[in-house]
Amino acid sequence: MSLPASIQVFERGWLSSNNVLLVDDTCAALVDTGYSTHAPQTRTLVQAALGERPLDLIVNTHLHSDHCGGNALLQAAWPCRTAIPSAEAEAVRNWDEARLTYRGTGQTCTRFTFTETIAPGMHLKLGALDWEVLGAPGHDPHSLMLYCAAERVLISADALWENGFGVIFPELEGESGFAEEQAVLETIAKLDVRTVIPGHGAPFTNVAQALERAFSRVAWLRADPARNAKNALKVLIVFKLLEVRTMTFDALTRMLDSASAMRAAATMLKPREEWPALLRGLIEELAVQGGPLTVDGSCIVARNTVTRSA
């Protein structure tokens, strides 16, 4: 993959987003920091790349736990500035885990602080390159992308992957999300992009084909919103299992009451009395040969290797 020398991409696994390290003479910046349980690995990757040089800046595209979970540990390791989406400033300042989605998804994120905010229309100098900040609502209402016109590089976060995009979470709560994702894809299609660095998966150059697949998926989800709910529930289940490695069916069923995003998705699919059967059906689908999960009696167990997809 041909990227400018000032850009280094750490492609991560399912729990953690990719990390993008951009280094020039004045600033070493990291875009997104992965999940909290992987934070020591994130620190090791950054330290190995920078050597004796400190990390100066963290930039978060959005504040889902898999994109900012390493913030706190990196802030402890280096006295770095941290830039977050401006719309999330109050929630972070008050550490409102409901607004920050951690309570709703049943995920964890170590509390962190921020020094500045970014918003659509701003420009950042990272890796000796000029980056325009673009809004990317859909997957998350406050999500951002970074676009370098000179190098035709887009850091797309979860708005566009090579095969799809992130779960459209607003639709689970009765808010608009499909239309916003469609608009973001249309924005990307108008840009001159040679290389996309996605939030998950390897950087890619087949941008036109990726957009075609993404547009098709938006249309498919909009035709039946229950499809988005089912996908969301599967994603959240796999994420949790990869974090804790094993879980009983009863514990997972109880999570539906405590995690509002999971509860909302389940409510769209089945009446509450049918949730145990719903979960068992989803687990069976996820445990087919080569799937991300296996079943051992009353326990669900995560496989070691999982590839993230829409």
Image (cartoon, rainbow, N blue to C red):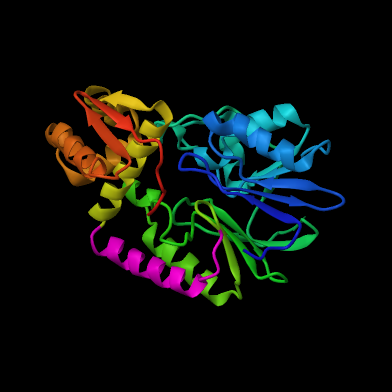
Percent coordinates x, y for residue 168 in the rendering: 39, 53
**Left-right relation of 298 to 173:** left
Residue sitting at 28 percent across and 43 percent down?
265
Residue 282 visible somewhere in the drawing: yes
Residue 115 visible somewhere in the drawing: no
Residue sitting farthest toward the right: 25
Q: How many marks?
A: 0
Magenta extent? 203-224
Looking at the figure, which quarter contains the C terminus? bottom left
**Rendered image quadrant of residue 70:** top right
Q: Nearer the viewer, residue 200 or 83?
A: 200
**Rendered image quadrant of residue 145:** bottom right
Residue sitting at 59 percent across and 37 percent down?
90
Residue sitting at 38 percent across and 68 percent down?
213
Please, what is the dominant secondary structure of the magenta stretch? helix
Residue sitting at 71 percent across and 31 percent down?
75
**Left-right relation of 218 to 63:** left
Relative to 75, is 233 above or below? below
Looking at the figure, which quarter contains the N terminus? bottom right
Percent coordinates x, y for residue 20 in the rendering: 65, 50
Q: Is residue 258 magenta?
A: no
Percent coordinates x, y for residue 130 in the rendering: 75, 63
Q: Is residue 209 magenta?
A: yes
**Left-right relation of 132 to 15:** right
Percent coordinates x, y for residue 51 in the rendering: 80, 38
**Rendered image quadrant of residue 104:** top left
